[in-house]
Image: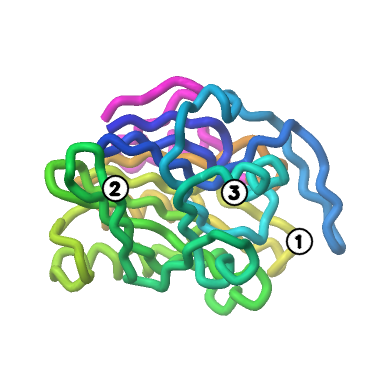
Amino acid sequence: MKITHVGGPTALISLGGLSLLTDPAFDQPREYQLPGRVMTKLTGPALGVAELGPIDAVLLSHDQHKDNLDESGRELLPSIPVVLSTPDAAERIEGVRGLENWESVELQRPDGGVLVVTGLPARHGPEGCESVTGIVTGFLLSGDGIPTVYVSGDNASVDLVAEITQRLKAGTIPGVTARTVDVAILFAGAARTALLDGAPLTLTSEAAVEAARRLAPAVIVPIHTEGWAHFSEGPDILAKTFADAGLPLQLPPTGEPLSL
């Protein structure tokens, strides 16, 4: 498989002959005026949509926040054959297929096999945050002869990561035969805003280390750690925290494919 990090939460995953795009955000740097606060994008995408080639599916963790689905990303969605997200997003955006937790959909692969995409629980902040930050989802990608990939989405809960790995090991996720994760794409960066008194809305570096321990022996590839003013722990802090913990970390280059 290959991962090409476009910037922020946006990455192109090449897996099983399919191209999957996470949380499309292609706007240039700007400020977004929101009720009671401003979100500031600091860097633009390393690649434009036209440079990515055909996209088979979008994995959208949620649609409520500009750093996960901006105006350019929203304009892209109607051209994508399959867009998977939360059931709430499916109610708001025409053409989106909503996945409940542990629900799977099969995507046909060019080799005749299937790529199973399973919706996974995620929580965008501390316990009880849903009324403020909204419902989000993660994804599990699996299939015969290909790596099993966990895409966390904007999840801040290590306990949910532990639940996912426990269910994998027990074989209790419907339609999934894999028992471990090979590659984990973790949204980290310890995002903080005025919401919820500044509590982290995504994994802190320390929490990412704990998640990595539960996901072992998965290769950890972090994204969504930079490019926006509300991230409090960038790639350097994340890399140092992993090094101090004695754990490997695969920081993806921006705009260049990373083969795994």
**Marks 2 and 3: in contact by CB < 8 Å?**
no
Labels 3 and 2: the sequence-earlier one = 3
**Marks 1 and 3: in contact by CB < 8 Å?**
no
Image quadrant containing the C terminus: top left
- Which of the pair 22/67 is nearer the observer? 22
Work out whether residue 257 can be spotted.
Answer: yes
Instruction: Residue 58: say if magenta.
Output: no
Which residue corresponds to mark 3? 78
Q: CA distance from mark 3 to mark 1?
A: 33 Å
Q: Residue 105 location, x and y as percent?
A: 32, 62
Q: Residue 227 location, x and y as percent?
A: 65, 35
Q: Is residue 33 left or right of residue 198?
A: right
Which residue corresponds to mark 2? 149
Q: Mark 3 against mark 2, which lies toward the viewer?
A: 3
Label 3 residue SS: helix
Work out whether residue 203 can be spotted.
Answer: no
Instruction: Residue 247: say if magenta.
Output: yes
Which residue corresponds to mark 1? 194
Vertical side of 33 occupied by 16: above or below: above
Q: Mark 3 against mark 1, which lies toward the viewer?
A: 3
- Which of the pair 78/220 is nearer the observer? 78
Q: Amino acid at mark 1?
A: Ala
Q: Amino acid at mark 2?
A: Val
Residue at x-position 37% and y-position 65%: 120
Q: Which residues are magenta?
A: 232-260
Q: Amino acid at mark 3?
A: Pro
Q: Residue 97 location, x and y as percent?
A: 47, 63
